């Protein structure tokens, strides 16, 4: 039996989370359950499901499906998560999530920080 | 300035999170802020700080330092996080966190699941 | 322009490589270009292409397409890479690579090591 | 025994490799064994050993220690790997490797590509 678990462990996907996100999500206005929901969405996307339902997300969290639906809607409205329409080879339109807005927000925050650090340096030098 | 941010991004560490943990933490009895706290501890350990203070954890979360102290203590008492004593080359004793108990709990849960799945198979075959 | 590169960097996938593989591939009988070829196959699989051609692999390596074809064939014959047949929803059969054999070989090697370490312990105790 | 291997697997570090590096190392002038050597250096750095010897690198590769010494020296001379001097709290100077030059070279290559793509667009529009 352990053979099976070992192989399950070895062949599972690893989600890679930038430490800059772990360091700055709170400053960006995200709560812990919102961050986890975003990571769950990313896990589903990487597994090939680009538009996981609130039900699917809820199965892996301490929130109910309706709480997940509300939370995901709020993340879209606040610009942390995008809902995009794509069309496949047969022209059939489907919806998918994208985390690009999350990374753009994080990059913007880092720019602001770098700018402030630079200005503080200048002020110190100018005395 | 963007040059600096690009390099900061490229040289940051990535935290790798097993998707099995993201799938099962709620079933294991962990809340979202407890999971994030564990991931923060791991990030600090991998950056060389094996015993981050509640203050350090709190800086990166929406919780206060005293809430973090309480949360970390609870994770240790419930057996998700271990507090170990090691001694360095000069014989000086220091404390460090270990996430080994978390992985053992996850492995135990997977074993239970595999066992249940096998028994259900047998029952079905036996009719 | 750097904005574009920053976003490209932030949204790229990261390939996670178990350090146990990096430590033991040579002992397992793999050469460096074979290891890289396996990692390239995994990268394509994770990006949704489960059966990358030797041409595609070759574009990212210092080997020609025919050298890649030969190398991949050798990895399959030596049991590091599996070639599987699956069928999609419409019943159309397609081929795909799986790295499961690689992980099984690595696990077998770790078992052998653990066994040897245990026997040496026993011999030492028995003196 | 499998219990031990499962835990070993679960607690091992994962090395994260940007897919952009896997896509472009050959174009950057790196051979497969040079790329693996750089990844081995990174693995050691992340495990706390910032200046692994050619012997240590060699143990995990198909190359001899002297081939590794030569290869690492060449990577430093060609600007893929930096050898830095730092001093610890007691003022003792020590040497360590840094992969920053590798990331800078990769970023430069991506810039060149983006620039070329943009110019081609302009030429097409000007027709």
Image (cartoon, coloured by chain):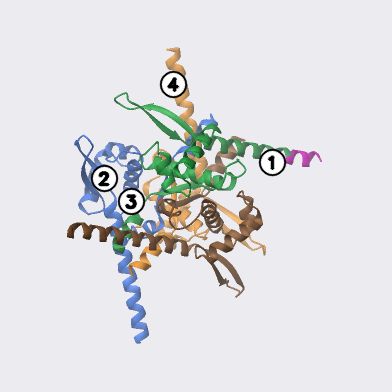
Chain colours: A orange, B blue, C brown, D green
Callout in the foreground (2, 4): 2
The alpha-carbon separation of the residues under discs 4 and 1 comes to: 38 Å
Question: Could you say where residue D19 lies in the image, as x and y percent from the top left?
Answer: 54, 48
Pointer 3 indicates a residue of which chain?
Answer: B
Which residue has dot 2 on it? B97
The dot on residue D117 is 1
The dot on residue D73 is none
Asked whether residue A13 appears in the rendered view, the answer is yes
Q: Are marks 2 and 1 in contact (CB under 8 Å)?
A: no
The alpha-carbon separation of the residues under discs 2 and 4 comes to: 36 Å
Q: Are marks 3 and 4 in contact (CB under 8 Å)?
A: no
Q: Is residue D124 magenta?
A: yes
Q: Is residue D32 magenta?
A: no
- Height in image: C41 above or below B58? below
Callout in the foreground (4, 1): 1
Q: Are marks 1 and 3 in contact (CB under 8 Å)?
A: no
Q: What's drawn in magenta, residue-wise?
A: D120-127
**Residue drawn 37% across and 63% down?**
A6
Question: Could you say where residue B11 lies in the image, as x and y percent from the top left?
Answer: 47, 38
The alpha-carbon separation of the residues under discs 1 and 3 comes to: 43 Å
The alpha-carbon separation of the residues under discs 3 and 2 comes to: 15 Å
Q: Is residue C102 left or right of residue B21?
A: right
Which residue has dot 4 on it? A120
Q: Are marks 4 and 1 in contact (CB under 8 Å)?
A: no
**Residue drawn 46% across and 40% down?**
D66
Element at badge 1? helix
Outermost residue to the right: D127
Task: Let me know if marks 1 and 3 both belong to one chain.
Answer: no
């Amino acid at each position: 039996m352990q053979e099976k678990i070992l192989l399950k462990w070895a062949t599972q996907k690893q989600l890679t989370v930038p430490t800059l996100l772990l360091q700055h999500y709170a400053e960006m206005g995200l709560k812990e359950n919102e961050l986890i929901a975003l990571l769950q969405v990313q896990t589903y996307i990487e597994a090939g499901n680009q538009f996981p339902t609130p039900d699917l997300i809820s199965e892996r969290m301490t929130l109910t499906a309706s709480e997940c639906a509300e939370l995901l809607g709020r993340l879209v409205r606040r610009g942390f998560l995008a809902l995009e329409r794509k069309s496949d080879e047969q022209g059939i339109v489907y919806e998918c999530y994208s985390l690009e807005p999350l990374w753009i927000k994080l990059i913007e925050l880092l720019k602001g920080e770098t700018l402030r650090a630079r200005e503080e340096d200048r002020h110190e030098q100018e005395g």
